[in-house]
Amino acid sequence: MKRFSTLLSLCLFLVGIGLSAQTTNYHITFEIENYDQDILTIANNMLKQQYVVDTLRRAEDGKFHFQSDTSELNKGIYLAVLAPDNDYFQFMVGNEEPTFELKGDKNNLAVMETRGSAENKRFFDYLTFIGSQRKTDFELSEKLKNPQLAAGEKEKLEAEREEIDKNVKQYQEDLINNHSETFAAAIIRANKPVSPPAYTDLPEEKRREKQWRYMQKHYFDNLDLSDQRLLRTPFLFERIDYYVHKLHVKHPDSIALAIGKVLEQMEPGTDMLKVYLSHYLNEAARSKVVGMDAIYVYLIDNYYNKGLAPWADEDMLRKFRENADKLRPILIGKTAPDIKMQKRDGSSVSLHEVDSDYTILYFWQYECGHCQKSTPVMKEFYEKWKDQGVELFAVCTKVGKEADGCWDYIDEKEISDWMHTVDPYLRSKFVKLYDVYQTPSVFVLDKDKKIVSKKIGAEQLDDLMTRLKEMEATEEESGR
């Protein structure tokens, strides 16, 4: 029996998703024997969550009626959830039949009688068939665990399991071929696995890479992302997210390319595009992974700035563009903006004047609790690396007369061997240039002042520098 354990924490799905004008009404009737509660909750799927669509009250005829005279029900797989234990069954809203009935028994929700919906009959027939085959396969697999099994009996059981697999695949193919335009066919087709060639003639490492590249190229062969019906299904998000985050290297450029491949398969202006574009934009904005802000900028530049997000109003677009404009100059790989700062003796020093293999640009202030905790870590880091081509360019962010306190703190903590600077009158505009709205804030620059990492903690610097030096050594070795 399936149980919808998260239902009580859900609220009505009120996120506007720009639905087009809809006029077809619907009326779905539910009759559930041995169910004595007066409430039936209808929910659907979106991304990795389920959302309540409506809460039905038992009518005088003892049934539950899910209906509207003014709008069409969005296509997808829905859940009818029973109180109080959140047991549920699924049903389909597909191409046809806005009016139909479903009848079942609370004690066996896997079996559902349908009236007026060929789409749901196909769906439940398929679920019943798969359930019976899975049960038989499980029984056979349990028998195969017997260590006393004779060789001939083992081969017979394995052959029976292979026959089950063959029967399931044939059932699926028949449904797809005979009812190709139906929602049930689309769901089965979308879940057909894509298997790469064996490439047995290649060595192991090259074979794995070839199969990986094949999967990247053919992953969506059976999954039509222009099909709006799939948006509200329990499997779509998992499938798409696997492609984005598992089939691609965790690097901003690679992830951005993967998201772009996903979005380009979706029809412009549709709910599908809006939901997934919004999802990956929000994911990039919230990400704590270094460099993922490049994905945010990519999505703004390639979708919102090109008019491909018509649901975004002017205020939203303005905020998005402002955020992207702040981030764009300080993305990893970009040349760090030069800033002219003031040293303790009043002389000027420019960031780009620093001659070192690596420069740690460190924004801090003495009243910041996290900065105070970072100070001894930064001190230890600099002691270790200062003779290995690493310079520490520290910027105390205090302004006006408060900037004088920076030098007192530096003396107190005995860290004057760093390159310390201030900008009491904000002439360098470092706050805007480096998006310094909280401290501490760290940027790691190479000898050409290109940003190689940023927004990391002081405790991460030693490991990062060790990896960078190891990469340098490897490159030098391979270049000989």
Image (tube, grey):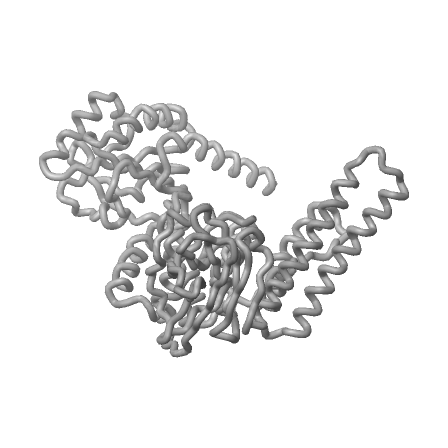
Is residue 121 shown above or below 395?
Answer: below
Q: Nearer the viewer, residue 48 or 241?
A: 48
Extreme residue in the right direction = 152
Q: Position of residue 406 (x, y in %)?
A: 18, 30
Compared across the picture, whether 384 is left or right of 238 comes to left
* Closer to us: 338 or 260: 260
Task: From the top left corner, tell me how far across and down residue 122 is, in percent.
Answer: 62, 68
Establish if 181 lies above or below 356. Answer: below
Does the image show residue 273?
no
Identify the image quadrant of the C terminus: top right
Q: Is residue 167 visible?
A: yes
Q: In the displayed structure, does residue 316 sit left or right of residue 465?
A: left
Image point 37% across, 51% down: which residue? Answer: 10
Image point (55%, 71%), residue name: 115
Residue pictured at 78% horizontal, 51% vertical: 161
In which image quadrant can residue 419 be found?
top left
Q: Residue furthest left?
A: 401
Give the percent coordinates (x, y) of residue 234: 51, 56
Q: Who's the residue at 36% across and 65% down the image?
A: 17
In the foreground, 154 or 85: 85
